[in-house]
Structure formats: C-alpha cells, structure tokens
Amino acid sequence: MRQTEKNRKKTGNGNSKARDPRYDCLRAVSVMAIIMVHAMPVETVSARQWWFNSIMTPFLLSFVGIYFMLSGMFLLEHGTERIGEFYRKRFITVGIPFLVYGLFTIVIMSMRTEWFCLSGSMPAGIWHRC
C-alpha cells in the first residue's frame, strides 16, 4: 500500500488529498506563537523587556494570519460540500458548545456576583458593581 493510501485511511475520508505534515508543523508553530503573544506581559519593568516585547510582538502576531490561512486550507480543501451543509456542521461543532459555555458562564457569574454583593466584597474584574 502506498503512503498516500495510508494517509487517506487515517483521515477517514477516501476523497481527501493526503495531508502534508509540513503544514501541520507550521500550524503547530503558529499555535505556539499565538500562545506566546498572550503570555507576554502588557506592562514592562525595564527597557530591556520593553525592547523584547516591541520586537517579538509583531513577529509573533504575524503567525495569526498564517494560522487562519492554514485552518481555512484544511477546512475547505474539498470544495464540494454545499454551503448550507458546511454551516450546519460548523454550527454543531462550534456554535452549540459556544452557546452552552456562554450560558453556563453567565449563570455562574450571576451567582458569584450575587454572593459577593451580599458579602460586601467585590473582586476585581467582575462585570458590574452591586
């Protein structure tokens, strides 16, 4: 069996092209760069740290575009799917978990806010004041 046939069996779709591992590695590097941008401090304590942030932030942010292009390439590599079916699948995989998590967060935060308002102490970052 050839290598491309093995790759097709792994993806589970016989119609798809074999994925190039170089793109997967580039996507992994992009994810790490995005995580590094979010982990960098906003306020700097020294000129050295300021220079480091000023140089690294634009470099690391350039990977955001690369990540979205690669994700779109993998997402739309077939191009034979009907647009309604495409959005239905995306709503099921992204929209429903987003709505459930959002409702869960709103309920938890409203319970926490009520408790903090009753106790008289309000933590920083809460959405509204008592």
Image (cartoon, grey):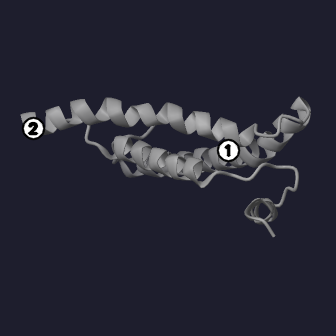
Which of the marked residues, 2 or 1, is nearer the chain's N terminus? 2
Give residue 96's position: percent from left, percent from top.
Answer: 76, 46
Q: Position of residue 111 (x, y in %)?
A: 55, 50
Q: Is residue 10 left or right of residue 122?
A: right
Please identify the quadrant where the N terminus is shown.
Answer: bottom right
Residue at 85%, 56% in the rendered image: 13
Using the rendered image of the protein, determine whether residue 130 is visible from the camera's viewpoint. Answer: no
Q: Position of residue 101 (x, y in %)?
A: 64, 49
Q: Position of residue 80 (x, y in %)?
A: 89, 36
User: Is 82 in front, or is 107?
Assistant: 82
Between 47 and 1, the one nearer to me in the picture: 1
Towards the viewer: 116 or 30:
30
Q: Is residue 80 left or right of residue 47?
A: right
The kind of secondary structure element at disc 1 is: helix
Name the amino acid type tagged 1: Phe
Q: How far, Cα to Cα, is label 2 from label 1?
A: 40 Å
Q: Which mark is residue 48?
A: 2
